Structure formats: C-alpha cells, structure tokens
C-alpha cells in the first residue's frame, strides 16, 4: 500500500546495481502513488532520489545534444569535402534514406523501446518521470524539459505527461495524442499512451483514444472510463463528458 516504509525501501532499491530491480522499484513507487490518487505521503527520500535521477538524466541528454547524431557519425566516415557537390548530395541522400528505414523498422518491430542508447537506458526514466508527475512540484520543470529530447519514445511521452501535470499546458497531451496516429508508435507504446491520457483526465483526447486503430477496444474503453473518473467535479451532462460517453458506447 502507501505505507511510507514501503516507499522508503523501494527508494533504496533505486540505487541497486541490477537495472531490472531499479526498473521495478520505480514502477512500484509510481503505481503506489498513482493508485492512491496522489494522497500518499511521499517520504523525503523518495522526493530527493527522484530529483537526483532527473537531474542526472537531463544532464546526460543535454550532453548528447552536443554530440554528433547517428547521421553525422556515418557522415564523418567520409571526407565529403573531397567529393564534388553531386556526389555529396547522393551520399547525404543515402544516409537520410537509411535513417528513415531504421525508423520504420523500429515502429514495426515487436520490441517497443528500440532506438535506445545504452547510456540512456541506464535508469528507468519513464517511471521516474511518472513519480515526478505525482509530486506536483513545479520546481521540477527545468529538469523534466530536457527529457522531451530523449531518444526513447515512452520517456519523451512521460515527460509530456509530467509537464502537463505541472504546467497545465495543452500542448503536452496534444503531443501524446499525436503518438496515437496509425503507425506512429508501436502498438504496445500506444496502449501506454491511451492509459496516460486517461490518467490525466484530458477529455479532448477521447476521440484520439477511441479512434486509435492499433489498440484493442478493451484498453481504449478503460482509458475512456478513466477520463471520466479523473474529472469527478465535472457535470456528467457537460458536452465534454457526453462526448466521452458516446465514444465508450461506440466501442461496445
């Protein structure tokens, strides 16, 4: 449950050598806090560890922005200056086509988290970010924003989820909704995204959730139900919630 001693023990596990133990610990902390509707008293050690890991991750991402991209790494194998303009353009086109083909492959593979560099997968940032979203601490915004540039799709979307919690800016759930477009992300990732939108209670996402062609209706129905549950003070007869009910009916 939400016993502080349980959360403290899980926070200790975030420093374990085993990545999968750290991942499960972060997931458990986030789920415990979310399950209790943010009413769980979060121990200071959990807050401190969350902030530490976010600062660490944001610094890593900032450093990577200054390093050569995969495209530039390939390009650096050639001294393009020694070629004429036509040859340079052909080489650049080859690199661009290869990058596009790799991106398509990542979206259709059964593995949702490809395009993950080893250094960026060292910490379970997706769940660390979801913990941060439940802390409702606006001072975290500067260390969360760099995660919008993560190479890991679910980490980027988790950052948008947190920033909507902290700022209320609709551009963040709008980005999550873009991930529901057909073929945009792996269907496993899209299951996560519709659940996140439901957890946020962002009613304008009802149409995107219901129309997501790659996710089973059972997942969509639960997400739509959560849209309603996470708007307890809204009039059930309001146009926004009536639209959600209509989308639920369409899935039955």
Image (cartoon, rainbow, N blue to C red):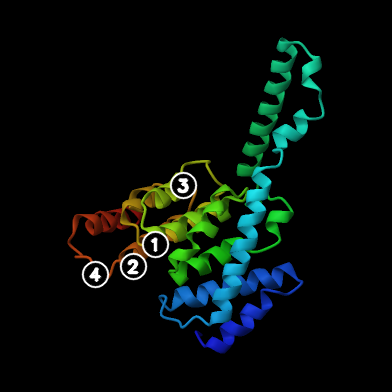
CA neighbours of label 3 inside 10 A, class few (<14), some (14 to 19), many (20+): many
**Label 3 SS:** loop
Compare marks 4 and 1 and give the one earlier in the sequence. 1
Q: Position of residue 250 (x, y in %)?
A: 31, 52
Mark number, residue 180 = 3
Secondary structure under tag 4 reads: loop
Residue located 67% across and 54% down the image: 60
| Residue 200, numbered label | 1
* Closer-to-camera residue (162/183): 162
Dot 2 falls on a residue whose secondary structure is loop
**Percent of width and height locating residue 161:** 46, 58
Q: Which structural element holds mark 1?
A: helix
Q: Position of residue 125 (x, y in %)?
A: 61, 62
Task: Name the N-terminal-most of marks 1 and 2.
Answer: 1
Q: Which numbered tag is attached to residue 233?
A: 4
The residue nearer to you, when weighing 8 against 219, is 8
CA neighbours of label 4 inside 10 A, class few (<14), some (14 to 19), many (20+)? few
> Disc 2 or disc 3, which is closer to the eye?
2
């Amino acid at each position: 449950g939400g016993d502080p001693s349980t959360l403290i023990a899980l926070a200790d596990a975030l420093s374990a050598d085993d990545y999968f133990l750290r991942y499960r610990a972060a997931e458990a902390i986030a789920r415990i806090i979310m399950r209790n509707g943010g009413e769980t008293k979060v121990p200071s050690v959990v807050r401190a560890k969350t902030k530490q890991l976010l600062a660490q991750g944001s610094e890593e991402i900032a450093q990577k922005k200054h390093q050569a991209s995969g495209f530039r790494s390939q390009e650096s194998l050639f001294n393009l200056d020694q070629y004429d303009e036509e040859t340079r353009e052909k080489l650049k086109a080859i690199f661009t086509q290869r990058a596009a083909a790799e991106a398509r492959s990542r979206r259709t593979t059964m593995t949702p988290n490809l395009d993950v560099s080893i250094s960026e997968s060292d910490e379970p940032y997706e769940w660390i970010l979801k913990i941060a979203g439940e802390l409702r601490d606006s001072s975290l915004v500067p260390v969360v924003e760099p995660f919008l540039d993560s190479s890991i799709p679910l980490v980027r979307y988790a950052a948008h989820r947190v920033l909507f919690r902290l700022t209320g800016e609709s551009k963040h759930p709008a980005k999550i909704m873009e991930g529901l477009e057909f073929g945009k992300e792996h269907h496993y990732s899209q299951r996560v995204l519709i659940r996140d939108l439901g957890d946020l209670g962002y009613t304008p996402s009802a149409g995107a959730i219901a129309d997501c062609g790659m996710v089973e209706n059972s997942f969509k129905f639960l997400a739509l139900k959560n849209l309603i549950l996470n708007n307890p003070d809204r009039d059930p007869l309001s146009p926004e919630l009536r639209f959600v009910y209509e989308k639920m009916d369409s899935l039955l």
